[in-house]
Image (cartoon, coloured by chain):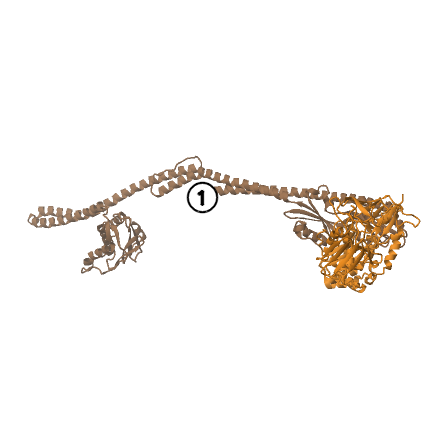
Chain colours: A brown, B orange
Amino acid sequence: MSFRTKVFLSIAATAVLAVWIVAAVVSTLVTQSFERRDAQRTAALVSQFQREFDRRGAEVARRIEAVADSDAVQRMALNLTGQADTSSYFTLAQTLAQEQSLDFLELVSPDASIISSAEWPARFGYKEYWLTPAIDWKSQKFFLKKEDLADGQALGLITVRTVKAGDGMLYVAGGRRLDQEFLDSLPGAEAMKVQLYRNFEPLPPPESLGSKLASSLVQDVRQQPREVTRVNSDATITAIPLLGRDSQLLAILLIENSRAELAGLKKYIQETAAIVGAAGVLLGLFLSFWTASRVTRPLRSLASSVREVALGKWDTRATVSSSDEIGQLARDFNGMTEQLVEQRDRMIQAERVAAWRELARRLAHELKNPLFPLQITIENLQRARDASPEQFDEVFRESTSTLLAELGHLKIIIGRFSDFAKMPAPQLEPVDINEIAREVLQLFEAQLHAPGSPVVETKLMLGADVGALPADPEQLRRALRNLVLNALDAMPSGGQLTVSTSRSDSKIAVEVSDTGEGLTPEECNRLFTPYYTTKQHGTGLGLAIVQSVVSDHKGTITVRSEPGKGATFRIELKVGSS
Amino acid sequence: MKRPVWVWLALSSLAVAPASAATRPHYGGSLTVELSTWIPVDSTTSALSIPITETLVRFNARGGIEPGLSVAWQRDADLKRWRFSLRPKVTFHDGEPLNGATTAPSLLAALKKKYSDVSIQTGGQAIVIQSSEAMPDLLRDLAAPSATVFRSSVANPLIGTGPFRIAAWEPGRRLAVVAFEDYWGGRPYLDSVTVGLVAGQARADIFEIPFGLTRRILPEGIAIWSSAPRTLVAITSASVQPALLQALALLIDRAPIVNVLAQRKGEAAFSLLPQWLTGYAFLFQTSPDLSRAKQLVAQVHPGPISLSYPVNDVFLRSVAERVALNARDAGITIQPTTSALNNPGGNLRLIEWRINSEDPATELVRIAAELGAGHVDTGKPETLYEAERSLLERVIPLVHLRETYGIAPRVRFEPSKSDSFALHLEDAWVQP
């Protein structure tokens, strides 16, 4: 993950988290505030309901008393003796109810028969036995009662009064409806949803009560009449049981405070938080770019400089654009590369000195051997001319012969060094590496089979699909010759020489293996150093020449060996890149 | 047909209204009438008779046919050709003489409703009615209110031969009639009669007392005249099973309907035609049997039933509600609903049938026709009874209602011509 991405994620996460926390806190506070308000409104409405209930009840009681005291009812009571004909009073209750604005009014004879009914005129003659027990109706101001109607049932706020009629009582029972219209008239009801579930009706489906919550609330209150408040995501609903004269549950008042306003506000908060969060993310994006431009650009510049150095451009310098930690890092990097260049120069200088010393040592060693016989021969000539002139001629012949031989030897040594110094650029042409390998081994056939030479078994393993590659055939022959020569030198007591070729992808490999004494790891490391040799009479140029040839062909040469297990030199050449 | 009950009712009801024998009839004066529901001027379906038109023949007090505008008639053996001799010296209200030519058009229109190929030939003071089919009931048909003889003009759509002629007519609001000086039976006592549609005012000389208007609020001195029961309130079935209809007939308590809803202005009805008209109606009388009704209901398992009643009819609405209440006691749900005039609707219908004549056969035939019951054999009282019993499988009679009128003290009637079927204003006069 890039630094810029990390910066972006950090800023964005911080912004989103902060906004979310603020939104959650605000949302919680708003919810609590709304719930407090709903509770206050509900309590106010319940109080208002109770006051209005009492007021209307008192009004109903007053109106029923007016009916009972009316001349018509008093005359009727006087006529209710014996088997009086009450048919002429059939419509009286309707008239009186209309006069007193009552929804319910029944005039009931002492034997509980309905004489006249305003709410259900056809019900005359039916019995109202609930009126006739010895009850002091005057003490019961008003009460809730289920009223039977022609088209169903209704809930009424009822008052009963009695009028003396002969030996019995004429009952005047009536009142007003307690219905949705009554609830809607309550101050404050318009801000809430106030419903009246009448318990003598089948439980309506949830949709008619507005919600499943209201429906379940009604069911609970029906099972155990008590005030209950419940909350869900849509509303806060309070259910209040309304009891009748005998404490039977007649109705349930449902006061519902919609949480739509709260939900809207919370939604607004969430949307605002989302917008602010998105702005934070955008800000994070901007800041990450800005920070990256301020922080990662010098770092990337520094990283680029590091890669340049790694590629060998030791004089690369990082741009120091600030005085902060990154600027200090760039300065340190530049100091480091300067030190590396100095050290490299010193190493090159040291290596050059070492190489010259080695060359001098090797030249001295190589030249000292033939020079010593030359010096001895010349001194021998001088002594022969002074001590025995008669033998001088013979000694002269022998000495000149020796001198010529040693001079020839010197010439060979100088030629080798000259060859190494004059290594030419390869002349590339398609070369069959298998053919080269066969030719080189063939060069050594005579030497291997010469009398007295150690027994060396040769093995040629050529890959069938090796093919050709662009190379300088003479230089390849020379390199292979040197490797084979090295291998033969490594097996003075005989062994097995294996030359193999193979191809993998775009590379052709040539391996020369021996079964000699092998090399130590340290010897392996120094093996390709010019003038380094493990042989008593070697110049140390053979493997250096091999490495030079391989390097000129853009190839690689490696060696793997363990002491006592022989050594294998492997040359890998690219088929198409030479 | 003998009608002892009819006679008793007539005598008892007239005891309160008619003038004393010592009071002499007096010509002149105007009479005002208030009706609660409008009665079409071309119909004599009301117990309040203000005769403007007349028929060729009419029912007498014994139920027989007597001459009207026709003084004599003959028929052929197969009852397909009838010849009527018109009463001489009879004129219409516009002075046109009554003869075959002026009589035939209205008669032919009325008879065509029953006899499709009937034709009328006229010649002077005679008309011949003939048809390809036998017309055994032609005299009853001609005595029916629908067979009145009248003429029409642009100015006056109803020109009759009766004792009163129309002076002013505002349909649905007011009718003013004046005495027809040239009436062949003699000028009526009253100079004029004005009929208005005013419910419950009780200010006129004669006013209808609706069912909801009880005696206790009537002005002092008002005499009450009640007709013989001549309106049947009944329930007809449109799509109710016979067993359920039988259960309803058993469970409905008719006494409260008569005593309270009708304010005793009627009789509990168990037959289509009232006792005074047939003499056998008591044979259908039963008592409410709720347990038997519940048994029948248990067999039927009825769903909710609608009972329709005419819109704006307060009395029938209260009857429907009472029936629904009774039905609920037996576990039947009846929903009273209003019905339009042109679309009765409902599983059950609450209807009123007015008895327009004093001939039971005529009335039963008419009721059978309205029920779609086909031919009714009215030849003998036994067949008439059987026919009515058959019709009762489709109808639940509830109450036979009387028409009741309040009559001011100054109004007097000629006692010898009074009956309980109708209150004849042509026999009334007012004290000066």
Residue B356, percent from left and from top: 79, 54
Locate residue B111: give its quadrant.
bottom right
Residue at the extreme right: B22
Relative to A511, residue A281 above or below: above
Q: Nearer the viewer, residue A200 or B74?
A: B74
Residue at the extreme front: B124
Residue B190 visible (yes or no): yes
Residue B140, percent from left and from top: 78, 58
- Residue occupying image coordinates x 92% and y 50%: B21
Locate residue B268: give its quadrant.
bottom right
Q: Nearer the viewer, residue B88 or A422?
A: B88
Q: Nearer the viewer, residue A146 or A512?
A: A146
Relative to A457, residue A379 above or below: above
Residue A564, percent from left and from top: 30, 58
Q: How many marks?
A: 1
B99 vs A22, left or right, is: right
Residue A519, percent from left and from top: 29, 54
The residue under label 1 is A2
Q: Dot 1 surroundings within 10 Å: few (below 14), some, or many (20 or more)?
A: few
- Tag 1: amino acid: Ser
Task: Say which quadrant the N terminus of chain A sits in.
Answer: top left
- Residue occupying image coordinates x 62% and y 44%: A263
Q: Secondary structure at mark 1?
A: loop
Q: Chain of mark 1?
A: A
Residue B231 visible (yes or no): no
- Residue occupying image coordinates x 67% and y 53%: A205
